[in-house]
Image (cartoon, rainbow, N blue to C red):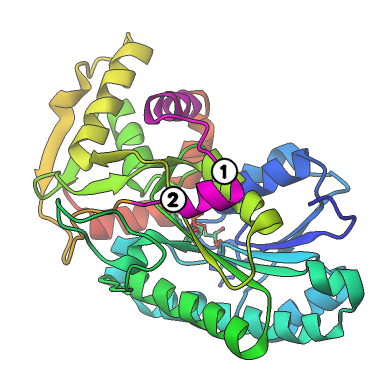
Amino acid sequence: LATGKPLLVTGGAGFIGSNFVLDMVKSGVAVVNLDKLTYAGNPANLAAIQGSPLYTFVQGDICDAELVSELMRQHKPSAVVHFAAESHVDRSIAGPEAFLKTNIDGTFTLLQAARAYYATLEGAEKDAFRFLHVSTDEVYGTLKPEDPAFHEGTPYAPNSPYAASKASSDFLARAWFHTYKLPVLITNCSNNYGMFQFPEKLIPLMITHALSGKPLPIYGDGQQIRDWLFVGDHCSAIAAVLEKGRIGETYNVGGGNQRSNLQVVHTLCALLDELVPESPYKPHTQLITYVTDRPGHDRRYAIDARKLEGEIGWRAQESFETGMRKTVQWYLANKAWVENVTSGAYQQWMTQNYAGR
Ligand code: NAD
């Protein structure tokens, strides 16, 4: 991927985007990172590459057509890797507008700009250009216990406003390939966890609550199953698809780690009992508390990643156990990061939406 031309990454100050940008820059690939810095974006995630000649940060909105076109003209990216999104299901239930704006309008704006830019390319640069749209397995809806895992041909059946907005953006990306021949790639990944994940999502929420002795809120019966993937493995899958994926294709990304939410929280509690032996809250499982389920909560997601593994040779490097241990260790070592991102606007949102939890 080190072509001398940068990747234009959107949403690179968020959880997965920042892990991807760090990996790329550290391996010698130049990156221009366009991020609006919503509550979920944090330039501190990228402190390790601040000042690197390979890294350029631009604060801005993917819905700003003028800006995204200008960035493509100015930086002449070898590819666009599109992470920017509103990404939290609970927030999409409380206020879907921002999800439609960023996830649908924003993707449309980027696709249009990429299409105009692609038309200006010639020869090897044109052949090499890719638009990689990062998406989620939530577009496929929910599985029954006996159903096979989601594969690339599973019909779309999104159930939350978040999933519906991502499904819409996937369809736009698909259409820009079929209609305009833009060299699009789409990845649909299962739930990620790891460093720099905003503490509103299950795993960091539970870690940060447990460390301060707050209740660990489990939705409903806690038997909702997700297929967990360490963020570094998602990033390596994206890099692999960018290099070797067939244009116009979709690749499902997952690590084959189906766990119920309750199992995940028990694993975290056991790790915290071990890694924080002086904690006054041991055993941390005593903090578990059951709360009203999320409306329309999908019961089970599972990913069949055989296309990615077979065609491209990608493999997840972390098991659920090793990835979770690394994650807990990272949150323990980075309490200042957590305090920084959970101050201000985040506290207000939590008070309004999670009162009593
Ligand atoms: P995140 O919420 O942590 O980060 C999103 C980033 O996008 C933030 O830095 C935010 O500032 C930026 N952003 C939001 N709106 C923007 C706009 N209008 N213009 C420019 N930047 C904007 O999200 P994440 O968990 O890192 O997810 C990244 C992508 O991966 C999303 O597209 C998401 O749908 C997808 N995905 C996430 C998961 C997961 O488990 N987190 C799994 C599969 C796919």
Q: Residue furthest front?
A: 310
Residue name at image x 60 percent, y 44 percent: 236
Question: Horizontal and vertical percent for residue 126?
Answer: 83, 74
Mark 2 C-beta to ligand 1 under 8 Å: no
Q: Secondary structure at mark 2?
A: loop
The answer to whether 271 is drawn above or below residue 345 in the figure is above
Asked if residue 96 lies left or right of residue 240, the reply is: left
Secondary structure at numbered mark 1: loop
| 295 left or right of 64 in image | left
Answer whether residue 181 is visible to the viewer in this image. Answer: yes
Magenta extent:
303-330
Asked if residue 16 shows in the view, the reply is no
Crowd band around label 2 with a 10 angstrom C-alpha radius: few (<14), some (14–19), many (20+)? many
Q: Is residue 247 left or right of residue 58?
A: left
x and y, in percent, of residue 252 in the image:
45, 57
Q: Which of these two is toward me, 244 or 324?
A: 244
**Residue at image point 66% right, 89% down:** 180
Task: From the image, give the main secondary structure of the stretch colored magenta.
Answer: helix
Q: Amino acid at mark 2?
A: Ala
- Position in image of residue 128 (x %, y %): 80, 66
- Determine the CA span between mark 1 and mark 2: 9 Å
Q: Earlier in the sequence, mark 1 or mark 2?
A: 2
Residue beneath the point at 89% across and 69% down: 124
Give the residue pinned by disc 1.
Answer: 314
Q: Is residue 139 above or below residue 239?
A: below
Q: Which residue is more in the foreground, 144 or 61?
A: 144
- Asked whether 339 falls inside the magenta stretch, the response is no
Residue in the image at 15% along x and 51% along y: 145
Which residue has dot 2 on it? 305
